[in-house]
Structures are given as C-alpha cells and as structure tokens.
Amino acid sequence: MDIITVEKFDHLYWLGRYTERVYTLLKSYLKGFDKMIDKDEEFYKTLCQQIGIPNTYVSKADFIKRFPFDETNPVSLISNLNRAYDNAIVMRDYIGTDTMSYIQLAIDDVKTAEQSPVALTEMQKVIDHILAFWGCVNDQICDMTVRNIIKLGKGIERLDLYLSLERPIYEIQREFNRMESFLIKSQARYDRSVINTFNTMFSSNEFNYSHGRNLLRNLILE
C-alpha cells in the first residue's frame, strides 16, 4: 500500500465524516419527524439550531421535504451523501469497489424515497446501507491505517454531533474514548492538550457542550 499522503488522509477522513453525518442526522430527522407530527410542528427550528445549520425552511412540510432531498442545499442529507461518494470514488483503490457501492446504494435510496408515498420507510434503507458500508470498511479494507483514518473521521463527526445535540454525558464519553483510540491508530497529528482538557471536563461536575465542540475543532493539526 502506498504512503498515506496528506491529500489521501483528507479524502479518507472526510469520507468517514460525511457518512457518519448522514447516519446520525437521518436518525435525528426520523425522531424529529415523529415529534413534528405528534407534538410540535415547529420542532424543525430546534433541530436546525441544535445541529448548527441555517433554518432556511418556511414550514414543517418544507423541512420534511428539503432537508433530505434538496441537492441545491449544502446541508441536506443527499448533499452530504454526494460528498461522501466524491471522496470514496477518489479512494476507490484503497477502500474497494464493494465498500464504495454501498454509498451509491444509499444515494439511490434517497432518490427513491423522494418519489415514494412511503418516504420514511425508504429512508430506513439509507441507514441499512450506511451500516453495510461500515461493515465493508471493517471486513474488506486490509490496510489498518486506511481503516483507522476513516473511523477517525466517523468518530470525530459523531462526537461533534452528539455535543451539538447535547446527548447524555456517558454517551459523549463513550464516543470520545472510541474516537481517541482511532486517533492514535490513524497516526494523525493532533493536539494532546485537547484530549487532556476533555478528560478534565469529564471528571468535573459540569460539562460544557459548547466548549467541547470548540475544542474538537482544534484537535487535528494540519
């Protein structure tokens, strides 16, 4: 296997981030859909604020349609899947055609769901194919460094989103510990002081979610 250059690292890292972004945001979208139907029609505003995206939606119906399917919207699920695929295709020789194909299948699922009267059922297939993608990463990528860089991107993205969504501290710490393991194995350059600060925050009585997100942005060194 070739040496992992900075450019290749970047493609693998963002492949991990974009696929995880779609996975976690889709799960949040499906939960939010239930809330908007049953309780709070304007919950989409809260969700946009939590995940740090601009609220460009005029109604619940507009959010339900455009957030998954609008390819002109850079924060939509389909836009993030397209970016994942762009990174995957560049790294096809490193990750394998089978691994990449599951991202294409997830894209196809979204496009099918857009035209379906049972869109939510079709969107569940996106989750299945992303999980299959991660299964292929584990099973078919032989180079451990390549595998760990992708998982590092996944881990940082999940931690970032969990911090935004203010998930319970035990979940934050669990994902942090997983991410740190891949960080070390990936051979990435990182700021050790960020890790130390997180550990101090975990041991304190109060955890600052916003500060955690700011710290995370400075973890990986150029």
Image (tube, rainbow, N blue to C red):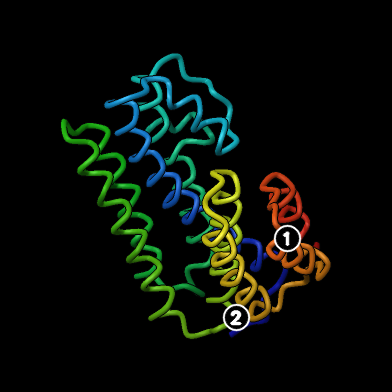
In the image shown, does 156 or 68 lie closer to the viewer?
156
In the shown orientation, is residue 210 left or right of residue 27? right
Callout 2–callout 1 Cβ contact below 8 Å: no
The residue singled out by tag 2 in the image is: 145
Question: At 49% from the left edge and 61% from the top edge, which residue is drawn?
Answer: 88
Q: Quadrant of residue 43?
A: top left
Q: Position of residue 220 (x, y in %)?
A: 75, 63
Between discs 2 and 1, the one toward the N terminus: 2
Question: At 40% from the left edge and 68% from the top edge, which residue is drawn?
Answer: 134
Q: Secondary structure at mark 2?
A: helix
Q: Quick one: which residue is furthest to the front in this view? A: 205
Of badges 2 and 1, the one in the foreground is: 1
In the image shown, does 93 or 210 lie closer to the viewer?
210
| Spatial separation of the CA atoms under disc 2 and disc 1 | 34 Å
In the shown orientation, is residue 42 left or right of residue 5? left
In the image shown, does 25 or 197 lie closer to the viewer?
197
The residue singled out by tag 1 in the image is: 204
* Callout 1 crowding tier (Cα within 10 Å): few <14, some 14–19, many ≥20: few
Q: Position of residue 186 (x, y in %)?
A: 65, 77
Q: Secondary structure at mark 1?
A: loop
What number is the disc on residue 96?
none
Q: Amino acid at mark 2?
A: Thr
Quadrant containing the N terminus is bottom right
In the shown orientation, is residue 181 left or right of residue 111? right
Question: At 53% from the left edge and 76% from the top edge, which residue is drawn?
Answer: 147
Q: Position of residue 196 (x, y in %)?
A: 79, 69
Classify 172 as above or below 148. above
Q: Position of residue 65 (x, y in %)?
A: 34, 26
Question: At 60% from the left edge and 80% from the top edge, which residue is drawn?
Answer: 145
Q: Quick one: which residue is furthest to the top in this view? A: 58
* Callout 2 crowding tier (Cα within 10 Å): few <14, some 14–19, many ≥20: some
